[in-house]
Image (cartoon, rainbow, N blue to C red):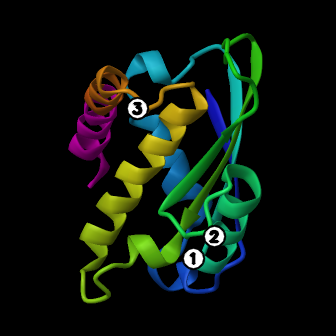
């Protein structure tokens, strides 16, 4: 089972997402079985932030002086799921998810689900530096997204 500690340092998230912890718990509940980690205690931390904070983190940890949609910091270089595993941290920028600002709530949430899955896979050491890795990660991301979205609404 996956548990998520959700924090927010950007007030705008509350306008679009009333019950943050519940929202992300629901996403994980609809993950395909292989990613639910049944009979295990898997956890991660999620920070719902903004462009300013994510730019600062991106500069400090990745030496890239720009904002981005999401950052993931795996706890281990080679994550091995054991009985009790801390996966790491994910930070998502509200400013990226809320573009265009005229989008409806359903589109906003679907984008958030997709980007959360992307970050989650990074915590499991998926990456997209090489084209072959990009294809593998994209396929896995879509597999999880389809599983979640088919049950979510």
* Residue located beneath label 3 in the image: 31
Question: Can you tell which quarter of the image residue 67 is in?
Answer: bottom right
Q: Position of residue 105 (x, y in %)?
A: 30, 76
Q: From which residue to which does the magenta span run? A: 140-153
**Residue at x 33%, y 34% (from the top left corner):** 141
**Secondary structure that dominates the magenta span:** helix
Q: Helix, strand, or loop for circle 3?
A: loop
Q: Nearer the viewer, residue 23 or 78?
A: 78
Vertical placement of 102 versus 26: above or below? below
Q: Helix, strand, or loop for circle 2?
A: helix
Q: Say whether residue 144 is magenta.
A: yes
Label 3 neighbour load within 10 Å: few <14, some 14-19, many 20+: many
Q: Kindly report which numbered mark, 3 or 2, lies closer to the viewer in this rendering.
A: 2
Distance, label 3 to label 2, CA atoms, is 30 Å
Question: Can you tell which quarter of the image residue 8 is in?
Answer: bottom right
Q: Kindly report which numbered mark, 1 or 2, lies closer to the viewer in this rendering.
A: 2
Q: Is residue 128 left or right of residue 148?
A: right
Distance, label 3 to label 1, CA atoms, is 28 Å
Question: Can you tell which quarter of the image residue 132 is in?
Answer: top left
* Residue located beneath label 2 in the image: 55
Q: Are discs 1 and 2 less than 8 Å apart at CB?
A: yes
Please identify the quadrant where the C terminus is shown. bottom left
Q: Earlier in the sequence, mark 3 or mark 2?
A: 3
**Residue at x 66%, y 14% (from the top left corner):** 81
* Residue located beneath label 1 in the image: 51
Distance, label 1 to label 2, CA atoms, is 6 Å
**Residue at x 26%, y 35% (from the top left corner):** 142
Q: Earlier in the sequence, mark 3 or mark 1?
A: 3
């Amino acid at each position: 089972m996956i548990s998520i500690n959700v924090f927010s340092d950007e007030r705008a998230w509350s306008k679009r997402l009333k019950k943050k912890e519940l929202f992300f718990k629901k996403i994980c509940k609809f993950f395909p079985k292989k990613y639910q980690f049944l009979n295990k205690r898997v956890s991660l931390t999620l920070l719902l932030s903004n462009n300013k904070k994510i730019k600062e983190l991106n500069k400090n940890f990745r030496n890239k002086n720009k904002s981005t949609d999401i950052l993931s910091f795996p706890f281990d270089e080679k994550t091995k799921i054991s009985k009790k595993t801390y996966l790491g941290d994910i930070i998502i920028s509200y400013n990226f998810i809320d573009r265009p600002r005229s989008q409806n709530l359903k589109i906003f949430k679907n984008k958030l689900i997709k980007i959360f899955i992307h970050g989650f896979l990074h915590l499991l050491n998926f990456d997209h530096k090489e084209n072959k890795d990009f294809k593998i990660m994209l396929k896995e991301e879509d597999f999880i997204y389809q599983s979640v979205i088919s049950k979510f609404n």
